[in-house]
Amino acid sequence: MSTTATRVIVTEDASSKRRLLRKQRPELVSRPGQRQRARRETAAGYAFLIPWLLGFFGLTLVPMAYSLYLSFTSYNIFSPPKWIGLDNYIRLFTADPNFMQSAQITLIYVLVGTPITLMAALGVALLLNYRDKGAAFFRSAFYAPSLIGGSVSVAIVWRAMFNTDGPVDSGLNVLGIDLGGWIGQPGLILPMMILLSVWQFGSTMVIFLAGLKQVPKELYEAAEMDGANAWRRFRAVTIPLLSPVIFFNLLLGLIGAFQVFASAYIISNGTGGPAGMTNFITVYLYKTGFADGRMGYAAAIAWVLLVVVAIIAFILFRTQKSWVHYSGDNR
Amino acid sequence: MTISSSSPNALVQLENQVDPDPKTSPARRRVKRKTWQTVIWFIGLITITAVVLYPLVWLFVSTFKPNSEFGQNQGLIPNSPTLDNYAKVMEGIAGVPMGQFFWNSFVLAALSVVGTVISSALAAYAFARLQFKGLGILFAAMIGTLLLPFHVVIIPQYILFNNLGLVDTFVPLLLPKFLATEAFFVFLLVQFIRQMPRDMDEAAKIDGAGHFRVFWSIILPLIRPALITCAIFSFIWAWNDFLGPLLYLTSPENYPLPIALRLYNDQTSSSDYGATVTASFVALLPILLFFIVFQRFLVDGVATQGLKG
């Protein structure tokens, strides 16, 4: 403990103050041996961090800065980047209907799909929490899709299942509903993509279930004694105590949903169709940067994505105070 | 929620039919009510299971359907089951046998595990156990990259690897793994190491052990469960990865399974449904087997560490 205290004082105070302090509170000021040990620990710390530091600076931070620079240029990989100022961004927001549509469907997918997934996950978690015996089997069974949901295989399966005369279409026909294949229809493909993400509710559910297990039983009993019905107990006990878990799942769910790529790419055969309705921001970025080779423009799309994700994370963290209850002190 | 709303009615009916005796004790009635709730609970969950697992069952069954049955028979029983699809898939596509795609996937996933586990454990030890200048800022930066969408760096990373002449090799896919860029794993291990008591570290240090010795002989054995969780997840993520190989691998003999599947999906989907679906199933098989063997480990890993699949 004394080492941390020492560091704070040594770094924050001027050397004259340090001399004074050494006279008054000798135990707080570093002795030569201690300082040497701290130096050795700093060296060890950076030595252990070498791979991470290389990755962070070489593959994340510097590339991000470079991509910010590229976003102000016109660049294909063959000729050097040409500075064009804000042109890429201006074009994105004023003259690129494909981008506007892409942003719109991505936002719908994220803002509709994530809450539905969370609600499904919470509902099933509540159901599983009702009883311990037998729950482990269902927990594993529901978890399986989230392990494979982003894979190409599953995208191919969904394509086959929702195609014309596929199982879903023929099943609905039996019920007298004739929607046709979902894959080719602009109005149905986005709901299908959302269904695919809801299908992967399992990992979120497992986290909810772990949270539910932590809610003290006495609280429910006390609420029941006070005459609270099931809904009231859910609103007044479960939701507040679960709010940190809800926050965590919401944050990761939203950020993850922005990054959906493989399923949209495979289901649309790389086109983002029909009528651009699977042209999520990541697909549009890929097509612009790598199929069309307009890397400057694609870098601008990437930065817009980054800023939007950052804004959403910021809003979530700001609203956290009003609805997330960390009960560390009274538990 | 279906339980609480529907069970009272079921209970009333049950009592009217089976047990009209007014002398039935409330305790017995409660037991009976509990039993019925449990039955409905099981029925509800089995229904959800059927819906959730239906696509996978459908996939498995479809691998035995001849091409002519696609679009005709959507049921779960093939009319004339056949193994032709498997034979066709093993031959491969684009002149590359299926075994090669499998091998590529395996090499990528296995080396990803090695790189991720080593580099993440090293970084996690520094973040969790050592005190040094800049620790706070670097740790915050690591947490920041947790939330960073990977797509923001694909363009500059591609330019970098392209300039180094490394496109169409495995290096661009593996190097990031050896440099701990998957912050999730670093964070998970940091959390795990922080839970470990410091007594053993301190004792070893008093006996003269250096930091590497402490890391190697004390911390690593202690965090083995977390390392296994990291290994399993990094294997599965690498196995499923699509965007990375799509960007960097251009010749078919370097393709891992997801990109090979794309070939089936693009070229033959209209004519050869059977092969496409079967190839998808074969590609999923290792993950499904992994899941069946390690399910408790995986699910508990998610429950305790908040890892997303």
Image (cartoon, rainbow, N blue to C red):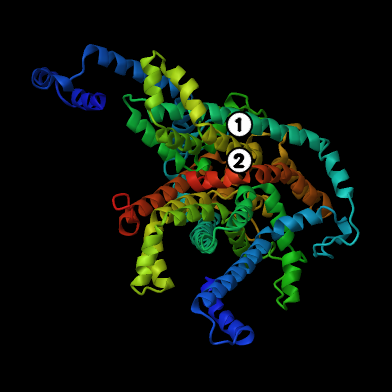
Residue at horizontal 69 percent and vertical 61 percent from the top: A183
On residue B28, which mark appears? Answer: none
- Where does the image place residue A184, in percent across and percent down from the top left? 70, 63
* Same chain check for tags 1 and 2: yes
A77 lies above or below A39 = below
User: What chain does mark 2 sit on?
Assistant: B
Q: What residue is shown with label 2? A: B237
CB contact under 8 Å: marks 1 and 2: yes
B254 lies above or below A210 = above
- Where does the image place residue B293, in percent across and percent down from the top left? 67, 43
What whole-number distance in Å separates the C-alpha atoms at marks 1 and 2?
A: 9 Å
> Is B64 in front, or is B272?
B64
Disc 2 secondary structure class: helix
Question: Badge 2, how many Cα within 10 Å: few under 14, some, many 20+?
Answer: some
Please, what is the three-letter code of the amino acid marked with disc 1? Answer: Ser
Q: Give the mark, 1 or 2, whose residue is nearer the N terminus.
A: 1
How many callouts does the rendering have?
2
Would residue A222 appear left or right of A48 to someone viewing this image?
Answer: left
A306 lies above or below B254 = below
Question: Badge 1, how many Cα within 10 Å: few under 14, some, many 20+?
Answer: many
> Is B280 in front, or is A205?
A205
Q: Is residue A76 visible?
A: no
Q: What residue is shown with label 1? A: B112
Would residue A197 appear left or right of A21 to someone viewing this image?
Answer: right
On the image, which quarter does residue A50 sit in? top left
> Is A255 in front, or is B300?
B300
